[in-house]
Image (tube, rainbow, N blue to C red):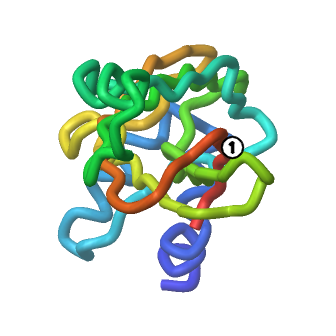
């Protein structure tokens, strides 16, 4: 009984050290309604490229013509994430900070894996030594942004 309890408590570590045992551990977790989490080594996940682009061409032409700032602005965040680890990992949460021309934080948005991948893909692990391109549409109202910062973390 003590051994079974130890396997339950240390199931994530066991699965990381002996990946061949993961399927058996996952099957054992089904009746207990638990899961076997993947590694969470944020130092091994990198944002290798990102861009925040305006998606609404009409709003850009209005602004260029001297019109008022549009009530809603549409942007698309493009980012490339790379898992540099030798094993699959949990997907991180992305933190998008939108700033004004002075660098003052205007908006902070935490994007969960389901937000930037979709629920089905977020349910799967971030494969070892892989890269994924994400595209997130954003709508902003009442703020004028001049820059952004993108970070990641595990909640």
Q: How many marks?
A: 1
Q: Nearer the viewer, residue 59 or 92?
A: 59
Residue 146 x, y percent position in the rendering: 63, 40
The answer to whether 107 appears left or right of 60 in the picture is right
Q: Which secondary structure lies at badge 1?
A: strand
Q: Which residue is mark 1?
A: 149
Regarding residue 86, the answer to whether it shows in the image is no
Establish if 23 lies above or below 130. below
Q: Is residue 15 visible?
A: yes
Q: Position of residue 100 (x, y in %)?
A: 66, 52
**In-front residue for pair 74/79:** 74
Residue 128 x/y as whole percent: 58, 22
Q: Residue at x 41, y 54 (%)?
A: 112
Taking 13 as reference, is 22 above or below it? above
- State the quadrant of the C terminus: bottom right
The x and y percentages for residue 12 are 56, 57
């Amino acid at each position: 009984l003590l051994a079974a309890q130890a396997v339950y408590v240390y199931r994530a570590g066991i699965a990381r050290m002996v990946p061949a045992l993961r399927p058996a551990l996952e099957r054992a977790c089904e009746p207990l309604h638990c899961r076997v989490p993947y590694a969470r080594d944020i130092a091994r996940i990198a944002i290798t490229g990102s861009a925040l682009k305006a998606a609404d061409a009409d709003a850009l032409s209005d602004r260029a013509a001297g019109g008022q700032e549009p009530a809603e602005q549409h942007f698309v965040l493009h980012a490339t994430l790379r898992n540099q680890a030798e094993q699959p990992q949990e997907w991180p949460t992305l933190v998008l900070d939108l700033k004004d021309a002075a660098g003052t934080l205007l908006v902070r948005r935490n994007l969960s894996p389901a937000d930037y991948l979709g629920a089905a893909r977020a349910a799967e692990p971030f494969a070892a030594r892989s890269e994924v391109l994400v595209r997130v549409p954003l709508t902003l109202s009442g703020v004028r942004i001049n820059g952004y910062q993108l970070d990641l973390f595990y909640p």
